[in-house]
Image (cartoon, grey):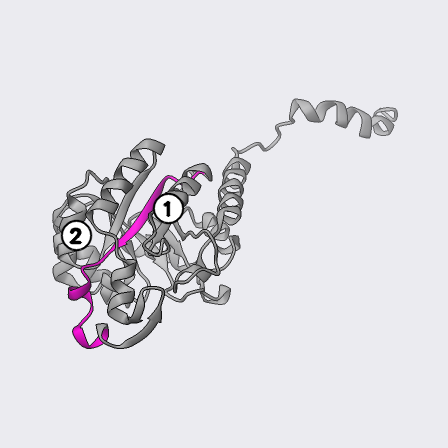
Amino acid sequence: MKKPYLIAEIGINHNGDMSIVRKLIKNAKDSGFDAVKFQKRTIDIVYDKKTLDTPRESPWGKTTREQKFGLELEKPQYDEIDNYCKEVEIEWFGSAWDIKSLEFLNNYNLKFNKIASAMIVDHEFLNEVAKKNKHTFISTGMSTKKNIDDAVGIFKRNNCSFELMHCVSTYPMKVEDANLITINQLKNEYNCNVGYSGHENGVVVSLAALQFGISSLERHITLDRTMYGSDQAASLEFKGMMSLTKSIEKYVNSIGEPSLGKILKEELPIAKKLRAHIQKKN
């Protein structure tokens, strides 16, 4: 079995603080993830004025506008992210929530794009992503079969490499809602690689997803699950990240190869000792 590609979703869990960004990137690298991922929005495109003007208490002010802009990183911060990821040797990419943000991310030499579950229904956006011809992870949370059909069709027509990611868009997700068997349905229906994007507490469900041969695994990460932010509670702290990656390593190593009739050399002295009373009969 091949280890899935491990994506540490920083998203907006950095709370606009570059010291937190750097710590999260370092934690992802140190715990064995392959990449970190961010979210990029053009605030005045993604949210209408009425929504932005609504009252909302946050560390940045008393309106939704102040909260959203407080969480958004811009070019100087992404330049720093790009340089730091190169320094520690980990991939990074982002899920854009609008075409302007997609073009922004495209200015960096990134290997991947990501379609957030919220964006899978925006055909114009999907077409623009597919035209970039970068391997794209497509999350399927909150999606009907037709939504997924349409997205897959767009990427196939544009000859853009992709994989689906089974996802349930609740934060945190209840274990009984995981329905991991859907991974096999997605594989059979669309004849493509399928990963898992998890929003549950702990690591058990993510480890269970390995039995379905997932090609990628994405989990939100944080420094502290009690920090401000809607995604923090469904995220892994460093200890949880280490537990996940070490457990995956053990899981993959335990699969091994067919060994019917094969006796390990380490078993031979044990067999001799434990079967001594039987050998005397012979």
Q: Residue at x 17, y 74 (%)?
A: 49
User: Which residue carries the number 1 mark?
Assistant: 19
Of residues 153 and 219, which is closer to you in this image?
Answer: 219
Asked whether residue 36 is drawn in magenta, I would say yes
Where does the magenta region start and end? 32-51
* Rendering coords of residue 169 (x, y %): 36, 65
Mark 2, other Cα within 10 Å: few <14 / some 14–19 / many ≥20? many
Asked whether residue 49 is drawn in magenta, I would say yes
Foreground disc of the pair 1, 2 = 1
* Rendering coords of residue 221 (x, y %): 42, 51
Q: Quadrant of the C terminus?
A: top right
Position of 115 relative to 276 (above/below): below
Task: Tell me how far mark 1 sits from mark 2, CA to CA.
Answer: 25 Å
Mark 1, other Cα within 10 Å: few <14 / some 14–19 / many ≥20? few
Q: Residue at x 48, y 61 (%)?
A: 226
Q: In the rendered structure, which amino acid carries the disc numbered 2? A: Leu
Of residues 273 and 100, which is closer to you in this image?
Answer: 100
Q: Residue at x 64, y 26 (%)?
A: 264
Number of numbered tags placed on the structure image = 2
* Rendering coords of residue 80 (x, y %): 27, 41
Q: Residue at x 19, y 65 (%)?
A: 46
* Rendering coords of residue 110 (x, y %): 22, 40
Q: Say if mark 1 contacts mark 2, CB within 8 Å.
A: no
Secondary structure, mark 2, is: helix
- Res. 124 visible in picture: yes
Secondary structure, mark 1, is: helix
Numbered badge on residue 102: 2
Position of 178 relative to 73 (above/below): below
Left or right, 282 with respect to 180, comes to right
Of residues 187 and 126, which is closer to you in this image?
Answer: 126
Residue 198 quadrant: bottom left
